Amino acid sequence: MRGFPVEPETIATAIRIGNPANWEKALKARDESHGVIDMVSDREILYAQSLIGLEGIFCEPASAASVAGILKMKEKGLFKGGEKVVATLTGNGLKDPHVIEKEYENKIKVIPAKFEDFEREIES
């Protein structure tokens, strides 16, 4: 596969597969749309995931990578203003909850799975 790592190391499990089934389609879509394909770091993915979370959306790291890419391209000055930019978030954060658990292990509070306990927690 041209230009794609065989075994990428990343927290994003859907990207870590290393041999995407639709790589050729992605290249075709990039070319037809005059788009860009780039790489982002795990840190950039986690940052994007946290920004997305501020909107109430819990997406998986691989989905957050699309937003991380947009942020990276904005930082590089790719956008002039007025463009339409689309980020597809297809995976729920529950696909890879261990990523968030590991990143925020000292800030996560586990409560019993009972409504009364949850209600008590949010009221306190």
Image (cartoon, helix red, strand yellow):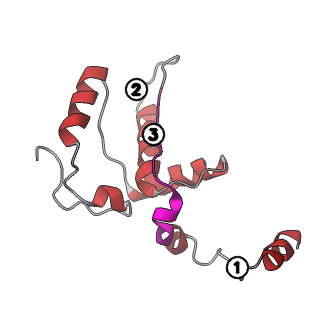
82 in relation to 120, above or below:
above
Q: Residues within 10 Å of mark 2 (few under 14, many from 20)?
A: few
User: How far across and how far down the image is residue 114, in percent?
Assistant: 75, 79
Residue that numbered label 1 is attached to: 113
Q: Residue at horizontal 45%, vertical 53%?
A: 45
Location of residue 65 with respect to 24 vertically, above or below? below
Q: Nearer the viewer, residue 37 or 14?
A: 14
Residue plotted at (44% across, 37% down): 70
The residue that appears at 46% across and 53% down in the rendered structure is 91
Q: Nearer the viewer, mark 3 or mark 1?
A: 1
Q: Are marks 1 and 2 in contact (CB under 8 Å)?
A: no
N-terminal-most mark, 3 or 1:
3
Looking at the image, tell me whether mark 3 or mark 2 is earlier in sequence order.
Answer: 2
Magenta region: 85-99
Q: CA distance from mark 1 to mark 2?
A: 46 Å
Q: Secondary structure at mark 3?
A: loop
Q: Which mark is residue 88?
A: 3
SS for dot 2: loop
Q: Amino acid at mark 2?
A: Leu
Farthest residue in the left direction? 1
